[in-house]
Each structure stands twice: as structure tokens, then as C-alpha cells.
Image (cartoon, rainbow, N blue to C red):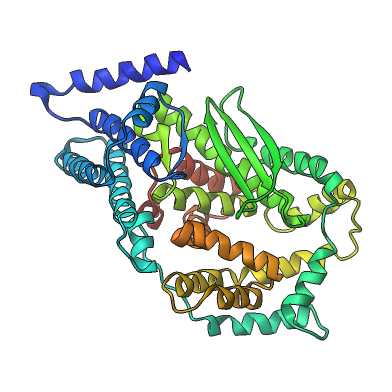
Amino acid sequence: MKPFHLFLAAMLLAGCVSSPMGRDSLDEIAKDYVQMTLEIGEREPGYVDAYYGPKEWADAAKAAPRSVAALAKEAEALSARVAAIPAAGLEPIERRRRDFLLAQLRAAQTRLRMIQGEKLSFAEEAQGLFGVRVELKPLSAYDPVLARIEMLVPGSGPLSERVDAFQNRFTIPKERLQPVFDAAIQECKRRTVQHIQLPPGETFKMEFVTGKSWSGYNYYQGNYNSLIQINTDLPIRISRAVDLGCHEGYPGHHALNMLLEQKLTKGRGWAEFSVYPLYSPQSLIAEGSANYGIDLAFPGPERLRYESQALYPLAGLATRDADKYLDLLKATSELAGARFTIAREFLEGRIGRDEAVALTQKYQLVSKKRAEQSIDFTTQYRSYVINYGLGQDMVRAFVEAAGPDPRARWAAMERVISEPTLPSDLLVRR
């Protein structure tokens, strides 16, 4: 990391020197933004999802983090400093950098208000933290979807139990998890590098863990390295191998973080991209692109073909009903929005945990244990849940607006995950 630190320091110094008469610069603000973010991370564990900048900055944050109230004032002051830099005098990519910093600082201000005890509605949280307006459907809007799924899994007993029992037939034996996931991630990578050039020497380490509220997590380490963890608290079904391989790996979180480091942190010396605050617009882009990346890498019938030919044999599973299983997954994906409605009702106190679990069983068609894990995630991460569905929809719309040519879609995807992209950017057709 030492050469990178020298490079980054030189770029920051260049930013100061290029500011005549002591005028402020985005480079100067970016350094202060990183320091503030690291200090917030000392006040709220988990706030900083990744950091790979100078060690002395992290050491300084650990040694003497400012109070939450002082950090709130700092976030306000930094926002004012960014706003004072005229956008008209900047190159287009620099204007996007300015907008990105403003959005990240608005999110920091919102999170600091929450840390200090301010209660926000679900919609206010989503707007303040992730920069999106949330419009949620009532749960009754998903009843027709449940009726269609009834036709796919006929029988007696609650629909959630029938769906869960059918899906359990596709569970990967624990002793076969490693080879199945290794193969899936490599295939996700193979398909990604056909369209996006990744940094040389990039790599990741994969671990199987327990005791988490999530199913998979990518801890980006910097220098194009990631730690990918897969939670085995609940049985893992065959579809999750491709899902998590793309989402956590390629073209998901691992690819996004590498490209931002290569293109922006190292390529342009933009220090703000060396830190990733979880509760920020970055997360909508990260989760949305990671989810959509699954369909981008495995369009149409290609996923069924690959899983049947490669993953099912590795898992020792019969392929007889593989097509029905995938059809069921596609149908249940139409229920994704119900999760966000349940989360809103739960977080705003209109329903308790037990009712939230029961509604999750009904409208997500999962077992009680899986429903409990889902509500545990909502309890821990709150409105963050909207990033998966809404983010995916927004990234999909932006990428597919490039046209049906896969090359054009992958090029649009690369722009999303390698530039200072905000949710609002996804509403602009380029």
C-alpha cells in the first residue's frame, strides 16, 4: 500500500497547490470527508463498510474520534464547502464528483441525526440515506402473485410451506458447498471479463460463516482484494451459488469496488472513494448493480443451461425439475416489494416482530426461520433493504435503455460501477 499512499498524498497536495489564493478544492474537502467518515465509523460500528486509504488516517480516527454532535457540524460544514465550489467551472466528470460528495454528505448528516436519536419515517430514511423516493404497494397488491404461485405448487397446507418444501429439494449438501460455489464464482467471472477489463492481480478469499443476518457479504480489502463470506445458518439452495457468485463477486461488489479503486481512487487520486460508508447512496448503486448483474451475466435460458450442466452435477442434485424450480424463483421474485412494505410497517411500529415474521412467511413464501432471519436483517439495517429491489429496478432500466445488444448493456453497466454514480444518474438516458 505504501506506493499508493505516496501517490494519494501527491494528488492531494496537487489539489491544494492548484487552489489559488488559498481557495478550497474538492481534493481538500475529500480528505476531510474521509477523516469524518472514519470517525463516524468509530461512533457507529459497521458504518464504514470498506476503507483502503492511508493507515494514519484510520489511526487518527481511532485515537481521537470527535463527538457525534461535532461530526454533525463537520458534515454540515463540508456540505457548505462543496456547495461553494461553482459547478459551472468544472469538467463534467468533476461536476459528478461534486454532486457525489454532496449526496454522500447529506447521507452522513441524516445518519448522524439518527445516531443522536431522531426518529425518521421509512421514506425519510430512504430519501436521506440513499437518495431515493420510495413508493410502496400495500400487501394486498401481491395477493394476485400468490394466486399464480398456487398454480405452480399445488397441494394442501399453507402455500409458504409447500414452496419451502419444494425448494428444499434443491439444497446443496454442506460437503459440496465449496466446489459448487467455486465453480459458480468462476463462471460469473468468466462472463464478466468478456466485457469488462478487470485490474490485473485481482483476487478474493471465500469463507463459510454462521451467526449472521445476511446470506452473503463482501468485505473489500483494497488493492483489488476481497473477502467474501457465505452464511450457512440455513440450508443453501442451488440457485444461491450463481446469485451470490455474481452479487458478491462478478460483476457485483468485488468488481465495483475494484473498478472504483482503479479508475477513481488511484486513477484520479480521488480520496473519497477510498472509504465506503454503508448508509449512503453508494449502497443503492452497489446493491442494485450486484442484483441486476445476475441477469446481465446469465440472460434468458443461459442460467438454466449452465446450472443444469455444471452446478447440479457438482451438488449431486437431479435436474429433473430444474426448470420448474427456476420458474418458481422467477415468480416469487415478483413478491420482492412486499418485503419493503413489511419493513416499513415494522420499523414504524404498526406491527410487531411476530406479525412481521408471519407476514414475511406469507408474502415471501419462506419458512419461519428464514422469515426470522429477514426480520433480523431489517432490525439491524432498517431502510437499507430497499437498495436491493429498488436499486435493481433502477439499474436495470438504465442499462437496458442502452438497447438489446449485450455489448451496449455491459458498457452501460461498466459506467455505473466505475464512475461517481448516484441514483439520480440512473434516471438520465445517455
User: From the viewer's perspective, is 341 left or right of 237?
Assistant: left
- Residue 76 image position (x, y, % from top left): 20, 46
Q: Quadrant of residue 36?
A: top left
Residue 346 versus residue 415 in the image, above or below: below
User: From the viewer's perspective, is 429 left or right of 78?
Assistant: right
Count up the numbered dots: 0
User: From the viewer's perspective, is 139 left or right of 37?
Assistant: right
Residue 340 versus residue 176 in the image, above or below: below
The residue at 53%/81% (across/down) is 139
Q: Nearer the viewer, residue 321 or 108?
A: 108
Residue at the left extreme, as displayed:
21
Q: Quadrant of residue 61?
A: top left
Q: Nearer the viewer, residue 120 or 52?
A: 120
Q: Nearer the viewer, residue 68 or 192?
A: 68
Q: Is residue 229 visible?
A: yes
- Residue 242 image position (x, y, % from top left): 71, 49
Q: Is residue 391 visible?
A: no
- Residue 155 image position (x, y, % from top left): 83, 84
- Residue 162 image position (x, y, % from top left): 79, 76
The residue at 47%/44% (across/down) is 46
The residue at 70%/58% (across/down) is 300
The residue at 74%/54% (across/down) is 303
